[in-house]
Image (cartoon, rainbow, N blue to C red):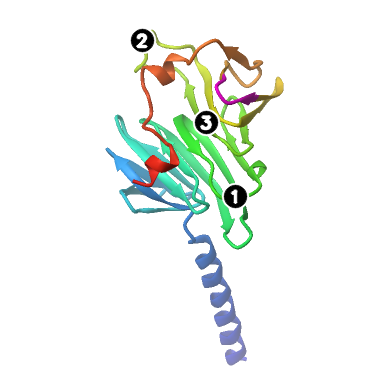
């Protein structure tokens, strides 16, 4: 009886370690870091990250004041985080042999610039924000959320979501409906119930406080 219990216990431990091994697979790597950034686990544990640090699903990456973090994800896509940003890596999976997987993210604060990677079905990428959900169709784009904290811009811009589409198309979806935008377009949404507005020119949140270049050739350096 005792032996049987030991077998059951060892079996449970085996599967537990197997589960841990799966969840411990990295979602990506810190390719470059200027300044300071941290990664916070789902359990609230905080660790400092640096160049070449691994980052994982269910972690929130936070950048300090004047700090930029460039993340290289497992599907070879790029995320470049602005200063004072919080970016949640909800779930990232990728199988190189089939180019299949998905990426679910949330921008909690600040902004980022993204360049899509090798994932074949770009519709399986989703970026959530407090204002709208962002879907991509094989593209690169920049987004920034202002919530009474965009003081690096003069004059201080209105609160809301600002988007610049750099390549191909982006789909925005909130309580007001869904809309699609193409390369070279600039968009503003005031809140989660507001209709998206096309802007005539590049908003000051990107002009006065530019994010480092996220071109794949530049990222490879």
Q: Which residue is mark 3?
A: 141
**Marker disc for residue 80:** none
129 relative to 32, above or below: above
Residue positioned 56% across, 86% down in the render: 6
Q: Which residue occupies the extreme top position in the image? A: 155
**Marker disc for residue 119:** 1
Of 23 and 202, nearer the camera is 202
38 relative to 101, above or below: above
Q: Residue 196, position in %: x, y?
A: 63, 17
Q: Secondary structure at mark 2?
A: loop
Q: Main secondary structure of the magenta part?
A: loop
Of 14 and 192, nearer the camera is 192
Measured in 3D between alpha carbons, the distance from the residue under mark 3 to the one under mark 1, in whole angstroms, is 16 Å
Q: Which residue is mark 2?
A: 154
N-terminal of the pair, mark 3 or mark 1, is 1
Q: Which residue occupies the extreme left position in the image? A: 35
Measured in 3D between alpha carbons, the distance from the residue under mark 3 to the one under mark 2, in whole angstroms, is 23 Å
N-terminal of the pair, mark 3 or mark 2, is 3
Mark 1–mark 2 CB contact (< 8 Å): no
Q: Residues within 10 Å of mark 1 (few under 14, many from 20)?
A: many
Residue positioned 57% across, 60% down in the render: 96
Q: Residue 207, position in %: x, y?
A: 40, 18
Q: With 220 as the anchor, is 128 left or right in this view?
A: right
Residue positioned 49% across, 24% down in the render: 145
């Amino acid at each position: 009886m005792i032996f049987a219990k030991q077998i059951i216990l060892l079996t449970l431990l085996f599967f537990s370690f197997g589960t841990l091994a799966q969840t411990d697979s990295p979602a990506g790597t810190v390719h470059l870091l200027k300044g300071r950034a941290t990664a916070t686990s789902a359990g609230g544990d905080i660790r400092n990250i640096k160049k070449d640090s691994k980052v994982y699903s269910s972690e929130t990456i936070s950048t300090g004041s004047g700090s930029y973090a460039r993340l290289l994800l497992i599907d070879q896509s790029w995320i470049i985080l602005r200063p004072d940003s919080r970016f949640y890596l909800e779930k990232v999976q990728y199988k190189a042999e089939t180019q299949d997987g998905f990426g679910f993210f949330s921008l909690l604060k600040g902004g980022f610039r993204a360049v899509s990677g090798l994932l074949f079905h770009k519709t399986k990428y989703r970026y959530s924000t407090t204002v709208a959900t962002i879907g991509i169709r094989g593209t690169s784009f920049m987004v920034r959320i202002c919530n009474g904290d965009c003081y690096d811009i003069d004059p201080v811009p209105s609160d809301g979501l600002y988007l610049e589409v750099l390549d191909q198309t982006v789909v925005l979806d909130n309580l007001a409906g869904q809309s699609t935008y193409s390369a070279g377009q600039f968009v503003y949404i005031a809140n989660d119930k507001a209709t998206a507005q096309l802007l005539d020119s590049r908003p000051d949140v990107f002009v006065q406080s530019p994010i480092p270049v996220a071109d794949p050739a530049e990222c490879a350096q």
